[in-house]
Amino acid sequence: MRTSTDDPLFDPKPQGLLFSMFGAYLHPRTAPMWSGGLVVLLEKFGVTTATGRITLNRMVHRGLAERHRRGRAISYTLSPRALHLLEDGDNRLATLAAVDDTPKTWTVVWHNLGDSRKADRSNFVKQLRFHGFGQLQEAVWASPKDYLREVKDYAKLLGISDEVAIFQCRLDEETVPAALLSHLWQLDDLAGHYERFARRYAALATEPESAPEDAFLACTTMLQTFRSFANLDPELPPLWTPHAGARARALAVYHEILDALRPRAAAYFAEAVDPASATP
């Protein structure tokens, strides 16, 4: 069982791949992971050894991981910020289909993060996009869902609460939102992306049980691809979007294949990153 990574929704960035692995396979999430094993796992997706090690170092500098040395062996544990991001990602993907028929509360976010705080701005906007926010205008983002708590928590985690304002509002019920929706989000291709995802991964359900490494590669590729929908899909009600049916089909395939592959993939991951595997 091998899956191609030529899907335009598949993001090969090594930090994203690691977070897909951590979210699906790391148990408990506070467990230490051998650096050499993490690098080897990234290599299976075309990431060079040097880039894998640089990625782990950057995660430490970004406050996402903590490094531990025992003799010559190095292991990593996830920081509280990384654990928060994983939990936030769990919640976002778990509720992707829980769409209100008529959104009652919109969330509008303004920030005052200039170039002097470019890294904070990038991290903050990345999380807004992950929750389906669309850019209303420069430094102003909007979502058709109540994300007050999530935005407040992440602003606090980044230490930027004093530079962020959050508004909750209602859309005029008589307003036809087509122009607003097309300004905030690119929805035309979303149904096609969901349909292609469903066709590609539904084929895995008919294949015989695969070896642990193949299950790991297929499951991680699927996870990383599916996470892209969090950035693309603002979870609009069916009345406002043509892709609700395609999303439901993609979600059904996602859960079916995840249930089938994750046990073997998780076992393969655990064995690879076990600190006991490190050479003394």
Image: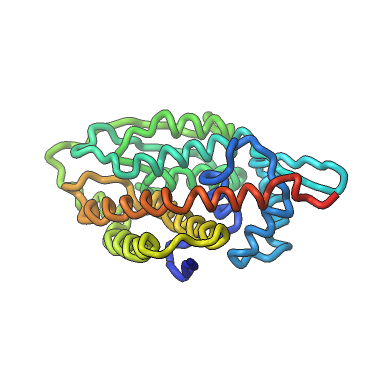
Does residue 195 appear to the left or right of 46 in the view shown? left
Q: Can I make out residue 184 in this image?
A: no
Q: Position of residue 198 (x, y in %)?
A: 32, 60
Q: Can I make out residue 94 in this image?
A: yes
**Colour option used:** rainbow
Q: Position of residue 139 (x, y in %)?
A: 44, 44
Q: Residue at x 33, y 55 (%)?
A: 253
Q: Residue at x 51, y 56 (%)?
A: 220
Q: Nearer the viewer, residue 117 or 146?
A: 146
Q: Residue furthest left?
A: 174
Q: Position of residue 92 (x, y in %)?
A: 40, 41
Q: Quadrant of residue 80?
A: top right
Q: Position of residue 16 (x, y in %)?
A: 55, 53
Q: How many marks?
A: 0
Q: Residue furthest front?
A: 208
191 w.r.t. 251: above or below: below
Does residue 261 appear to the left or right of 175 in the view shown? right
Q: Nearer the viewer, residue 165 or 24?
A: 24
11 w.r.t. 124: above or below: below
221 w.r.t. 79: above or below: below
Q: Residue at x 38, y 41 (%)?
A: 94
Q: Residue at x 87, y 44 (%)?
A: 71
Q: Quadrant of residue 91?
A: top left
